Amino acid sequence: MPDPKIVVTRKWPESVEAELRRRFPDVQLNVDDVALGEQGLRAALAEADVVLPTVSDRLPAELFEGEPRTRFLGNFGVGYNHIDTDAAVKAGIVVTNTPRVLTDTTADTAMTLLLMAARRAGEGERELRAGKWTGWRPTHMMGADVTGKTLGILGMGRIGVAVARRAHFGFGMPVVFYDPVDFEPEHGIADVRRFDTVEEVLEVADFVSLHMPGGPENYHLIDEARLARMKPSAFLVNSARGDVIDPEALANALRSGTIAGAGLDVYEGEPDIPAGLAELENAVLLPHLGSATLETRTAMGMLVLENLQDFLEGREPSCRVA
Ligand code: DGY
């Protein structure tokens, strides 16, 4: 495919955009970083050979109707539940993602949420900035210890393992996990136990960190009944996908003390925040910052380019997902 027409749906790190411009004469960058929306994405699929989307672009089956010109969708991000990959494949489109390069950065975000929730860091900062801090006192804003507590991981893939290792080797936390896939994850952790059900993890863990993909298979995996299985002193951390949690059930559980707190980086229907969460002091809320470092976002962009180059030169892209 000589000089493919390429549409990049959002602004990318400067060095990656420079590389795109250097390699491809017909590339349309999004300098204003305004989301293309349904119409813009439909137009991109109709007119461009290559579309490079990301998690904030919704690409349901309808967008692939009408014989799109696009042959390659290089997603900037590891999660791709925003793309109907079956419909993309039916339309003859190859889809890739960006695993591995964001594992450590996303695991760092999960640990940030865990620590912030346990130590009431967001609440403390809000108090201080509001000029309401009256000084040190023995019972001021007491949180929960992290060291030595049990970490439960749901989804022991690359990121789940990276979080488990941080918690275990950094904070002496024993690890329990559930993963629906029958494989032996390499983690090097001695104090680890695999359970056959989500419930068993929820019942023993002091902190539960979610690392399951979003989409229909895990939709509202954490619902009212499962939240009720957690300890009242436990914390829930989600740096995976928002739709893995039923947000109304979570807000109720946080309000009623069914669980002690939550740290969230992702939301169903983001950028909207599910009703009721923003008012709760025991919810730490970040704006989907999981992989947001310059180094990692640059590596993600470069990996999209590597996948694209492979595709254009007739090789199998190493991160092909459909
Ligand atoms: C990912 O890579 O899936 C991040 O959540 C950003 O999309």
Image (cartoon, rainbow, N blue to C red):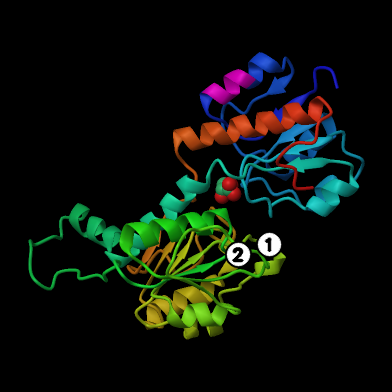
Q: Position of residue 147 (x, y in %)?
A: 29, 66
Report the residue that reaches farthest toward the right.
67
**Which residue sits at x=92%, y=40%?**
67
Pointer 1: what residue?
215
Q: Mark 2: is the Cβ under 8 angstroms from ligand 1?
A: no
**Which residue sits at x=44%, y=66%?**
190
Q: Position of residue 82 (x, y in %)?
A: 69, 52
Badge 1, how many Cα within 10 Å: few under 14, some, many 20+?
some
**Principal SS element in the magenta part?**
helix
As helix, strand or loop, the secondary structure at mark 2 comes to helix
Horizontal side of 244 relative to 259 (left or right) equals right
**Quarter assignment of residue 69:** top right
Badge 2, how many Cα within 10 Å: few under 14, some, many 20+?
many
Q: Is residue 266 visible?
A: no
Q: Identify which residue, 173 or 186, lies in the foreground.
A: 186
Q: Identify which residue, 228 or 124, lies in the foreground.
A: 228
Pointer 2: what residue?
243
Q: Position of residue 124 (x, y in %)?
A: 23, 60
Q: Position of residue 133 (x, y in %)?
A: 13, 60
Amino acid type of the residue tagged 2 in the rendering = Asp
Q: Point out the tag, 1 or 2, that comes first from the N-terminus.
A: 1
Question: Which residues are drawn in magenta?
Answer: 15-19
Q: Are marks 1 and 2 in contact (CB under 8 Å)?
A: yes
Q: Is residue 17 magenta?
A: yes
Amino acid type of the residue tagged 1 in the rendering = Gly
Report how far apart the C-alphas of labels 1 and 2 lie in the structure: 7 Å
